Image (cartoon, rainbow, N blue to C red):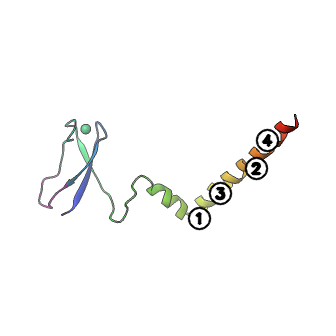
Amino acid sequence: MPIYEYRCERCDHTFEVIQKFSDEPIEQCVVCGGPVSKVLSPPGLLFKGTGWYVTDYANPERKKALEAEKSPAGDGKGKSKQEAKGT
Ligand SMILES: [Zn+2]
């Protein structure tokens, strides 16, 4: 039996419901009774929150940009430390 995930549009409560294909879809939040929308979670994608992170690193251009951001920041820190010592 498939598990459906719903998210409340009013209180943002997320809950999972095991339903048959023939069952009526859930339309009300179990907490506040507000309208809910079905969250489609693709099979195999287990870490929902960090999904964007994985996709970011899969993109070579994005990876380059992230690495470019890191290196100058590290150099700047080291320099300012030395200068502070001198004074
Ligand atoms: Zn709710």
What mark, if any, has residue 75 been given in the picture? 2
Q: Which is nearer the N-term, disc 2 or disc 3?
A: 3
Q: In this view, does 40 lie to the left or right of 33?
A: right
Quarter placement of the N terminus:
bottom left
Q: In which quarter of the image is ligand 1?
A: top left
From the image, tell me which residue sits under label 4. Answer: 81
| Residue 16 in picture, x, y percent from top left | 24, 52
Q: Closer to the observer: label 3 or label 4?
A: 4
| Residue 38 in picture, x, y percent from top left | 26, 51
> Which amino acid, mark 1?
Pro
Q: Is residue 82 left or right of residue 42?
A: right
User: How far is the residue under mark 4 from the one under mark 2?
Assistant: 10 Å
On whether ligand 1 comes within 8 Å of the CB at mark 4, the answer is no
Considering the numbered disc 4 on the image, is that residue within a helix, a strand or a loop? helix
Q: From this viewpoint, which residue is outermost toward the top?
A: 87
Considering the numbered disc 3 on the image, is that residue within a helix, a strand or a loop? helix
User: How far is the residue under mark 4 from the one under mark 1?
Assistant: 33 Å
Q: Is residue 86 left or right of residue 12?
A: right
Q: Which is nearer the N-term, disc 1 or disc 2?
A: 1
User: How far is the residue under mark 3 from the one under mark 4?
Assistant: 22 Å
| Residue 36 in picture, x, y percent from top left | 24, 44
What mark, if any, has residue 67 been given in the picture? 3
The foreground one among 62 and 12 is: 12
| Residue 43 in picture, x, y percent from top left | 32, 65
> Which amino acid, mark 4?
Lys
Residue 81, image quadrant? top right
From the image, tell me which residue sits under label 1. Answer: 60
User: Which segment did they paint magenta?
Assistant: 18-25
What mark, if any, has residue 74 been given in the picture? none
**Residue 22 counted in the magenta span:** yes
Q: Which is nearer the N-term, disc 4 or disc 2?
A: 2
Q: Which residue is drawn at 71% across and 47% down?
A: 73
